Amino acid sequence: MKATGVFLLLCLALCSYPGNTEPDGAAHTGTEAACGNYDLKKGCAKIFDPVCGTDNILYSNECLLCFQNLQRNTNVHIKKRGKCQEPSPRSDSTQN
């Protein structure tokens, strides 16, 4: 009986963990942007320091990612610094 109770409590704890409640789970992979470093009311600097968001969109800089999160009420994180991975080239199925 004790083992069953412990098992149920463990299952409840795992099911209510915030990382498991989001449908796509993609927003929590990657690094959270340091949005507190920017005054988003004044806008963002026009500096090209690209970041790839967990939504696979390239943002010109971290501030713009933060600004879009604020505007769209989303929680996109930084997947990686730099450009997003380019799609693999399509194979050419045309043969002579």
Image (cartoon, grey):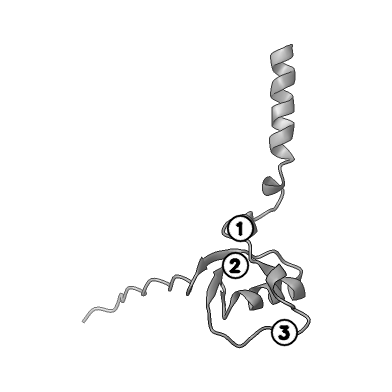
Q: Is residue 68 left or right of residue 58?
A: right
Pointer 3: what residue? 43
Pointer 2: what residue? 55
Secondary structure at badge 3 equals: loop
Q: Quadrant of residue 93?
A: bottom left
Going by the numbered disc 2, the residue's amino acid type is: Asp
Residue 17 position, x and y percent, is: 71, 42
Going by the numbered disc 3, the residue's amino acid type is: Gly
Relative depth, front residue between 36 and 22: 36
In the rendered view, tell whether residue 74 sits above or below residue 94. above
Crowd class of label 1 (few under 14; some 14 to 19; many from 20; radius 10 Å): some
Q: What residue occupies the far left of the structure in this picture? A: 96
Q: Are marks 2 and 1 in contact (CB under 8 Å)?
A: yes
Tell me the quarter of the image containing the N terminus. top right
Q: Nearer the viewer, mark 3 or mark 2?
A: 3
- Identified at 72% across, 66% down, the residue is 74
Going by the numbered disc 1, the residue's amino acid type is: Ala
| Among numbered discs 2 and 1, the one appearing first in the sequence | 1
Crowd class of label 2 (few under 14; some 14 to 19; many from 20; radius 10 Å): few
Rounded to the nearest angstrom, the CA distance separating label 3 from label 1 is 26 Å
Q: Quadrant of residue 13?
A: top right
Pointer 1: what residue? 26
Residue 24 position, x and y percent, is: 64, 56
- Identified at 61% across, 58% down, the residue is 26
